[in-house]
Image (cartoon, rainbow, N blue to C red):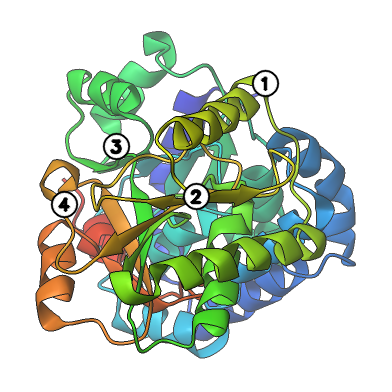
Amino acid sequence: MSTPEVTARRLAASAPALRAIADDDLLEAWNDTLAAFLDSTSPERRTLDPDLLQATGLSPAGLDRGLRTIGAGMAGEPAAAALRRAPKQQRDGFSFVILPASPPGLLLQSLLPALAARAPVLFKSSRAEPFFAPAFLAALGRRLPILRDACAAATWTGGDLSIEARLHAGARLVATYGNESTIASIEAADPRRLIAFGPKLSVGRVGADADLNRAARGMALDVALFDQRGCLSVEAVFVDRAVAGHFADSLAGALGEMATELPPGRSTAAERAGVRLAREDADLRGLAWSGDALDTGTVILEDHATLLLSPGLRTVRVHATDSVPALDDWTGRLQGIAFAGRMPATVRRAFEQAGVSRFAPAGQLQATDAAWRNGGIDLAAEFAAGS
């Protein structure tokens, strides 16, 4: 079995052949592979799903809806446009991408830019979810065999310098998704060039003019997808004070319905304890809250506009506000906003200044497409430029 270092050398040598692939051939292979992985009845998914369900803890319906949400906007014309506009890597060499455990399918958001830039990439899958990346890359290689030598996935214990030191030193670019300690350890390894997508969270914003029932249904989906474990999962909603109570009630009802449509997956004792503590804290502070089972959703109507972390398991704090929320402590840690109704320019500007890179209508926050730039970063251009 090849070591990651041997695989990286093979990838680096594939750069000239990768540059020679026509956009049309690459797009056909990409679209065919993606279509198979978004179809729960395909042979690829029937083979993959048992392992992926075990690794992620998602329910079958939750896994299927999540993958389709991530992938649907990365096929067809959006993918074709990404291939057309991307600059191409002109020098030989490979890049190194470190994937997170959740959400599954996040590989797509770095793989398509790499292919568009004709950049060979070694992906390190998380030990907690080592299945999606190699399965997708193998299927892609079956459709376009030259890609077998241009993209690869491997799994090992993170921080093993006997494996990683030469990868960090040899890669034209290292891109990592992870927590602060993971990023710090990679920075200490002094790679030639590093792009870090650190831990972030997303929130919602509902104006007084919004259709509250429609906003609640959309926001519930943005909460429930991937059981609130993605950086685009909504953890709190800022709502105009005049309608905050009505919206909180509507959101609680929508989350209850969502628990039937997208049943929650496995939860840990620590997660359940966190929700229980959040509910008890709300009781002690005299706050209104709604929720049934610990893993099917909790809505807490807060009496302040200070953003607090959710304990997870579809727990959402609704903050009644009259003005711009206080975001100073969260600058650089916010990813997206799901909105309903009018958003004043001052409010949007505050979120933009806090680092929000995605604004989307409620219910569509996690339905990113090939044009989205995570954190404002044009990943295809970064792959092409390298070190």
- At horizontal 24% and vertical 46% (from top left) the residue drawn is 333
Q: Position of residue 176 (x, y in %)?
A: 35, 39
Give the mark nearer the N terminus: 3 vs 1. 3
Kindly identify the residue that appears in the image at 19 percent across and 18 percent down. Answer: 188
Task: Please give left or right for residue 348 compared with residue 47 in the image.
Answer: left
Whether residue 2 is visible here, answered yes or no, is: no
- Residue 351 location (% of width, % of height): 18, 64
Q: Quadrant of residue 218?
A: bottom right
Residue 363 point in image, percent of width and height: 53, 75
- Of tags 4 and 2, the one toward the viewer is 2
What amino acid does circle 3 point to?
Ala
Q: Mark 3 or mark 2: which is in front?
A: 2
**SS label for mark 1:** helix
Residue 217 in sight from this viewpoint: yes
Q: Distance between the residues labelled 1 and 2?
A: 24 Å
> Circle 4: is it few (<14), some (14-19), or many (20+) Cα within 10 Å?
some
Q: Nearer the viewer, residue 341 or 91?
A: 341
Q: Distance between the residues labelled 4 and 3?
A: 36 Å
Residue 195: mark in rendering: none
> In the structure shown, which secondary structural element does the residue marked by tag 2 occupy?
loop
Q: Is residue 235 above or below residue 276?
A: below
Indicate which label's residue lies in the foreground, 3 or 1.
1
Determine the CA span between mark 3 and mark 1: 40 Å
Q: Is residue 193 above or below residue 322?
A: above
Write down the residue under mark 3. 171
Percent x, y of residue 295: 69, 41
Q: Mark 4 points at which residue?
A: 327
Indicate the quadrant where residue 309 lies. top left
- Check disc 3: other Cα within 10 Å, few if <14, some if 14-19, many if 20+: many
Q: Distance between the residues labelled 1 and 4?
A: 31 Å
